[in-house]
Amino acid sequence: MSDFLLRINGDTRCPERINVPECPDDWAPGVFSAKLIKSAPSTRADGTKAGRPVTGDRVYIWINESGRDSSGGGLTAVAWIDDVIEDNSELRLKTNGLRLLKEFVPFDRAFERSPLAKILIAVKKYRPERIWSLTAEDTDALDDLIAYAGGLQDLDQVDPIARALKQNEDAIEAALPVRKQTWIKPRHGQAEFRRQSLERHGGKCAFTGTGVEEVLEAAHVIPHTGAPEFDRPENNLLLRRDIHALFDLFLISIDPGSGIILVSTQLEGSPYEEMRGKSVDHKLAASALNFHYKHFCKTVTT
């Protein structure tokens, strides 16, 4: 058995073109593609050529965080190769046993953690897509990053919010434009939801630290549709009223990999730019955070 790092663009290489999976089912087809370079199907960290993956090999899946065809979270999953199919200029890798990281690891965070790791030094020199053949030292470095980020999700781990996302797709899409129409949206049960949010987040805005209760609101990350899963604590943030409005408009978000605040270019020149890059203790479910991040990325590119 050999180990490989598959570093690819999400829009063109991932199942269903999903860059940031909310649960393994998002990548259920399990087929990833990579550019086929017959003279060097894969490359080692020292620059030498290596062979291509085969059935039974293990693959670490890294979705590029930025670029024309990608908005992934970095190191995202580990899987086993079930089959390898050569298709014109591509290798199609059918996988099984895929497990997502509990928290994705973008390159900057990975390199900050392990600046001497040979595989990361090599990846830094060559940022585009590539299949990397890994040594035991390389896999140790990647496994350390996975452990640093909280490990892999359990195979039997069920995220009720992720499941509800699948079951309520139409209702969520209908709710998104509605919640953008007004800043204040009183609902049945909102008082209890707000009370829980105040307690969970220590009575302070998660983004600004504001502790004036009169200007704080409980924000649903995935919009309220009536599904009870979306009223769970892992789907709420306590936000200052103006921050809540910007969050609902996907003009600010949180990077799933690093946990830092992202600010849309539409807010350039505004005081909100000062939040960019600050770390947030968000306490959100990965599925909720990834949902918001994906919509933020769509807003930025439109």
Image (cartoon, helix red, strand yellow):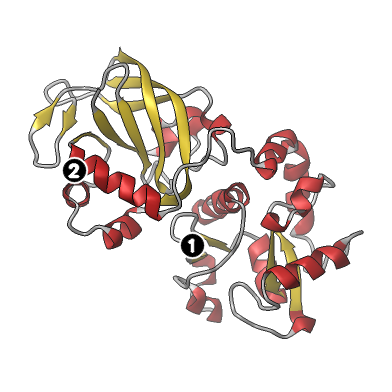
> Would you say residue 288 is visible in this rendering?
yes
Q: Callout 1, which amino acid?
A: Gly
* Residue placed most toward the observer, 127 or 139: 139
Q: Quadrant of residue 249?
A: bottom right
Determine the residue located farthest toward the bottom in the rendered image: 212
User: How many numbered discs sit on the rendered protein?
Assistant: 2
Helix, strand or loop for disc 2? helix
The answer for how far apart the CA atoms under marks 1 and 2 are is: 28 Å
Q: Quadrant of the N terminus?
A: top left
Residue 112 % position (x, y): 28, 62
Against 142, residue 6 (above or below) is above
Residue tagged by mark 1? 259
Which residue is depicted at the point 36% across and 26% down?
Answer: 33
Residue tagged by mark 2? 137
Mark earlier in primary sequence (1, 2): 2
* Residue placed most toward the observer, 213 or 65: 213
Residue 143 % position (x, y): 32, 45
Q: Of the numbered discs in the image, which one, if any, rests on residue 132?
A: none
- In this rendering, would 65 be left or right of 260? left
Which residue is depicted at the point 69% across and 55% down?
Answer: 235
Residue 147 % position (x, y): 39, 50
Helix, strand or loop for disc 1? loop
> Would you say residue 66 is visible in this rendering?
no
Which residue is depicted at the point 20% across and 46% down?
Answer: 119
Against 253, residue 295 (above or below) is above
Q: Callout 2, which amino acid?
A: Glu
Which residue is depicted at the point 26% across and 30% down?
Answer: 3
- In this rendering, would 100 be left or right of 249? left
